[in-house]
Image: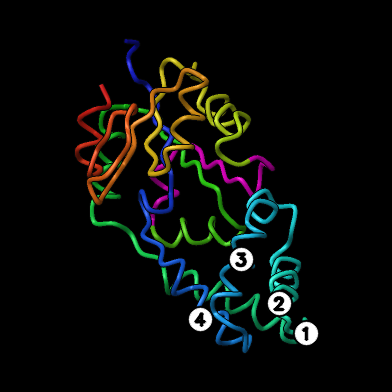
Amino acid sequence: MALTRACLVDVYETLVAYDFVAHSRALAALAGADAGAWQRGQVAVLPDFDKGVLSPAEAITRILAACDVEPRPELVARLARADSEFMTAHCGLYADALPFLRELRSRGMKIALVSNCSANTRRLLTALGLIELADEVILSCEVGFAKPEPEIYLRALDALDVPPTAAALVDDQPSYCAGAASLGIRPIQLTRNGDAPPPFPVATSLPEAAKLLI
């Protein structure tokens, strides 16, 4: 096995705990919409939203329409502001996130944060102190590709100037691990609840993942 010189690290549910359900319910309540309908609408727009195809206002307009709520401009603007505020309120670092990144840096390993996310994420990563611990930050909303599409991994590898065989990915989603593996990147699936299907190496915490990064 080639020496691991770089690590691509997922953000949400790997470094950052995110209560998607609470976020959805808070926005639905503000919109006066059914919480279940709002969450289904939010899931439906995610592929385009994560790739930056939709602005926050455009995504909210689609979700309101799916909830049979009139997308009045003032309501859309209020929800867009609240979405950013709720993102901060419903996200927080896992206790092992910063120590994990610092450990990798102490080894001289290059780090790229690679996330499927909205435009609010870069601001959040800065506020949480994650940006300063990464060499590169590859966000789907900025590059126009999302995991498990090969292009987003290749962007990260190019930015770090390493071949796939010298890189690993730490991610909680098996499909994203599979996308990395198809390119020759070594996947480590993070399963904080202890459950994971084969065939990927599994870690139940970031310190455990660090031990697998040899």
Residue where numbered disc 4 is placed: 26
Q: Amino acid at mark 4?
A: Ala
C-alpha separation, residue under disc 4 versus residue under disc 2: 14 Å
Residue where numbered disc 3 is placed: 42
Residue where numbered disc 2 is placed: 64
Residue where numbered disc 1 is placed: 70
Local packing at callout 2 (Cα closer than 10 Å; few below 14, some 14-19, many 20+) is many
Question: Mark 4 against mark 1, which lies toward the viewer?
Answer: 1
C-alpha separation, residue under disc 3 versus residue under disc 1: 16 Å
Q: From the viewer's perspective, is 59 left or right of 84?
A: right
Q: Amino acid at mark 1?
A: Glu
In this picture the colour scheme is rainbow
Local packing at callout 1 (Cα closer than 10 Å; few below 14, some 14-19, many 20+) is few
Task: Please report whichever mark, 3 or 1, sits nearer to the chain's N-terminal start.
Answer: 3
Front-most of residues 25 and 112 = 25
Magenta stretch, residue numbers: 129-145
The N terminus sits in image quarter: top left
